[in-house]
């Protein structure tokens, strides 16, 4: 097993190159759209920084709260929890204060660490008919929406993480943390191979395969469409870690 630190071993300029094509399209469409993007960027940064007091207040009410996820351009703007009892089903039908709720809360499974240092942090949320929780993930299946909404933010105590969306698609409703062993680089690569598979129901950023590997840090937002019973996921890659806390060991066991 060898130690990989994203900042020592991965050139962040290389990671950001996955957006060269889409950013070029934005710039070529005219100055007005560019100015709108810059304004939105400032607003996004301000909103992330404003989470601190609200996050601390919620955490004081429920210690299971460990972060906050915000997806600009959608109504996804929620605290993220993990059951301290290890019950992965608890927040399926309980809200962020632990009250019984049909819509549940946004949560991660016990198999994920709450420091966001796993290869793939999987956040789950329901898809109610009222459009709340993770129902807006469906929008990323539209190519225009996918191309225009690039970032996901996660606020944590003392850090605010930025993830760049590079894939959104529909898959069978199988638990990712059970299907893939992300403790090994081979399991990480197996998930990336799934993303690489061609499908009509898949939006991806062109050229992402050359930039993202088992050494990166992914965030997957997951929901189940009630109508089809299929799982809708939006996958993003960490590109911003101001506190420099995101790191892990990458075990290359299993590779020839």
Image (spheres, rainbow, N blue to C red):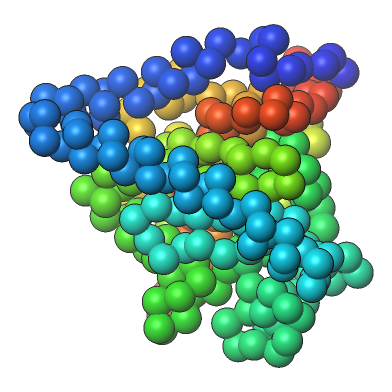
Which residue lies at the image location 47% right of the left edge and 81% below the top edge?
Answer: 128
Front one among 24 and 199: 24
- Residue 70 seen by the camera: yes
Which residue lies at the image location 76% right of the left edge and 81% below the top edge?
Answer: 98
Which residue lies at the image location 62% right of the left edge and 48% below the top edge?
Answer: 155
- Residue 220 seen by the camera: no
Q: Is residue 213 above or below residue 46?
A: above
Front one among 20 and 200: 20
Whether residue 1 sits left or right of residue 148 in the image: it is: right
Q: From the top left corner, tell me how far across and down residue 122 is, in percent.
A: 64, 52
Q: Quadrant of the N terminus?
A: top right
Q: Is residue 13 above or below residue 224?
A: above
Q: From the top left corner, tell me how far across and down residue 78 is, in percent.
A: 57, 64
Q: Residue furthest left?
A: 30
Front one among 185 and 22: 22
Whether residue 133 sits left or right of residue 38 in the image: it is: right
């Amino acid at each position: 097993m060898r130690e990989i630190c994203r900042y020592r071993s991965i050139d962040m300029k290389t990671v950001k190159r996955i957006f060269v094509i889409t950013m070029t399209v934005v710039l070529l469409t005219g100055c007005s759209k560019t100015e709108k993007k810059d304004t939105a960027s400032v607003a996004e940064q301000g909103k992330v920084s404003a989470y601190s007091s609200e996050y601390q207040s919620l955490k004081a009410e429920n210690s299971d709260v460990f972060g906050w996820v915000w997806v600009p351009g959608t109504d996804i703007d929620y605290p993220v929890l993990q059951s301290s009892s290890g019950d992965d089903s608890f927040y399926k039908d309980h809200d962020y204060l632990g009250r019984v709720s049909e819509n549940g809360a946004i949560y991660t499974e016990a198999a994920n660490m709450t420091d966001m240092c796993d290869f793939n942090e999987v956040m789950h949320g329901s898809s109610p008919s009222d459009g709340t929780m993770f129902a807006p993930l469906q929008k990323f299946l539209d190519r225009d929406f996918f191309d225009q909404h690039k970032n996901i933010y996660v606020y944590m105590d003392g850090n605010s993480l930025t993830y760049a969306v590079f894939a959104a698609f529909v898959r069978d409703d199988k638990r990712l943390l059970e299907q893939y062993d992300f403790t090994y680089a081979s399991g990480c690569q197996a998930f990336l191979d799934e993303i690489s598979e061609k499908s009509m129901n898949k939006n991806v950023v062109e050229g992402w395969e050359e930039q993202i590997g088992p050494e990166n840090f992914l965030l997957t937002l997951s929901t189940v469409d009630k109508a089809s019973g299929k799982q809708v996921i939006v996958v993003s890659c960490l590109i911003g870690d101001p506190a420099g806390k995101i790191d892990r060991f990458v075990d290359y066991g299993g590779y020839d």
